[in-house]
Amino acid sequence: MKKNMSNLDRILRIIIAAAVAVLYFMGILSGTWAIILGVIAVIFLLTDLIGFCPLYTSIGFSTLKKS
């Protein structure tokens, strides 16, 4: 897998996932929304760890600058 995510994209994904976690543990998110946003947050963290987003590949998009 060739990386297709820039550092800014990866940082934003971490911030969003952390915000979802904080909202969940503070009790602000619950029920169906907590599950949906939790799954999205986990996907964000996984794609951040590997630096590759399959959705970007499927639409031919990349935030990584070409060398």
Image: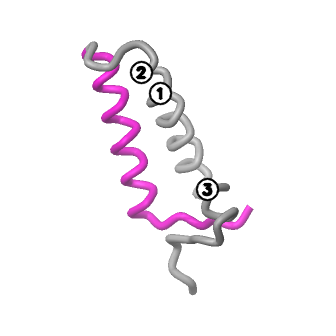
Q: Amino acid at mark 2?
A: Ala
Query: Which of the 4 image quarters holds residue 14?
Result: top left
Q: Position of residue 50 (x, y in %)?
A: 62, 52
Q: Nearer the viewer, mark 2 or mark 3?
A: 2
Residue type highlighted by circle 1? Gly
Dominant SS type (magenta): helix
Q: What residue did someone put label 3 on? A: 53
Q: Residue furthest bottom?
A: 67
The tag earlier along the polypeptide, 2 or 3, is 2
Q: How many marks?
A: 3
In the rendered structure, the answer to whether residue 59 lies left or right of residue 28 reads right
Task: Please say if the residues under marks 1 and 2 sit with CB atoms less than 8 Å apart.
Answer: yes
Disc 1 to disc 3, C-alpha distance? 18 Å
Q: Which residue carries the number 2 mark? A: 34
- As helix, strand or loop, the secondary structure at mark 1 comes to helix
Residue 37 or residue 4, whichever sits in front: 37
Amino acid type at circle 3 is Cys
48 over 19 or under it: above or below: below
For the N terminus, the image quarter is bottom right
Name the residue beneath numbered marker 1: 38
